[in-house]
Image (cartoon, rainbow, N blue to C red):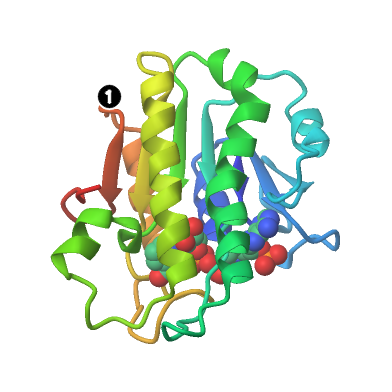
Amino acid sequence: MVTGAGRGFGAALARELSAAGWLVLAVVRQASGPPALDGLPGVQVVIHDVRSDDLSAVVDAVRGRPVDVLINNAAQGAAHQRLGSVDAAGVLNAVDVNAAGPLRMVQALLPQLLSSADPVIVNITSRLGSVSAQARGDFARLSTSYAYRVSKAAQNMVTVSLAQDLQGRVRCWAVHPGKLATGMGQADAVKPPRVAARELLELLESNERRSPRFVSLGAPDLDW
Ligand SMILES: NC(=O)c1ccc[n+]([C@@H]2O[C@H](COP(=O)([O-])OP(=O)(O)OC[C@H]3O[C@@H](n4cnc5c(N)ncnc54)[C@H](OP(=O)(O)O)[C@@H]3O)[C@@H](O)[C@H]2O)c1
C-alpha cells in the first residue's frame, strides 16, 4: 500500500514495486486516475484523501488480505513564511496530512498488517523533521517552513510511538528519501525519484530488523 502514488516519489515507488512483482494498492486522491500508473502490472488504484476519517475505500480494496508493507508517502509541502506571518491554518493542514494521515492509515489497516508474516510501516519523512538537527542549527541557512518542519517532526513522533506500541510485531521506519527532483523538491534537489525508490525497495527486501529507525536513503541514519 503506497499513499500519494499519483506522482513524484509515490509514483516511482509504485513503478519499482510493480516491476519487482509486488501487488500494489496505489492510493491517490483524484478520481480521474493518474497516467503515471496506467498499465502497471499488479497495481490497483484506490481513491482516498489521507485527511479523511472515512477509510472505507482503503479497507475495501484490501479485501481482508495481509498488508506486508504500508508506505505513508503522501505529504503536504509548504512554502517558507517569515516569522510574524506564519499561517496557523497551514501548519494544522500539514499536520493533518503528514502526521494524522499516516496514523489514520495504520489504525484502519492494523488487522491486515498484523496478519502479515513480517509487516513493515514506512513513513516517508524528511531530514527537516529532525528536532536534533534543527537544534544543532544544521538548517539555519535553509528556507523552510514551520508547517513542514512541525508536521514532519510530529510524523517522526508517530513513527517512534508506533514502533514502541508494535514492538516485535510490526517494524516501523521513518525514511528520508533524499533531495528529490519532484514537485515538492527544492531548486537544488536533483536525485531522481526512481533511484530513491530502488534504494527503499532494497531496504524492504533486506533483513533489516531494527525498529524504530530513521533512515536516510543512500546515507547514514539520521538523529531523531
Ligand atoms: N522532494 C523532496 O526533495 C523530498 C525531500 C524529503 C522528503 N520528501 C518526502 O517524500 C514524500 C514524497 O514527496 P514528493 O517529493 O514525491 O512530493 P510531490 O511530488 O509533491 O507528491 C506529493 C504526493 O502526495 C499526495 N498528497 C498530498 N496531499 C494528499 C492528501 N491529502 N491525500 C492523499 N494524497 C495527498 C499528492 O497527491 P496530488 O497529486 O493529488 O496532489 C502527491 O501524490 C513526501 O512525504 C515528502 O515529504 C520529499
Q: Is residue 6 above or below residue 201?
A: below
Which quarter holds ligand 1?
bottom right
Q: 132 or 171: which is nearer to us?
A: 132
Q: Is residue 175 visible?
A: yes
Position above or below: 49 against 25: below
Pinpoint residue 109: horizontal percent, then vertical percent. 64, 27
Q: Secondary structure at mark 1?
A: loop
Residue 80, given in percent of the width and then of the height, sits at: 45, 82
On-image quarter of the N terminus: top right
Residue drawn at point x = 40 percent, y = 31 percent: 161
| Residue type, mark 1 in image | Arg
Rate crowding at label 1 as few (under 14), some (14 to 19) or many (20 or more) other CA atoms within 10 Å: few
Q: Residue furthest right?
A: 31
Point 73% across, 66% down: residue: 35
Label 1 beta carbon less than 8 Å to ligand 1: no
Q: Is residue 197 left or right of residue 131?
A: right
Q: How many marks?
A: 1
Q: Which residue is mark 1?
A: 209
How far from the left and from the top, in percent, is residue 14?
Answer: 57, 50
Q: Residue at x 43, y 19 (%)?
A: 166
Image coordinates of residue 110 in percent, x first then y, are 60, 22
Q: Is residue 6 visible?
A: no
Drawn side of residue 102 relative to residue 44, left or right: left
View extreme (front): residue: 84
Which quarter of the picture shows residue 190?
bottom left
The image shows residue 165, relative to residue 22, as above or below, that is: above
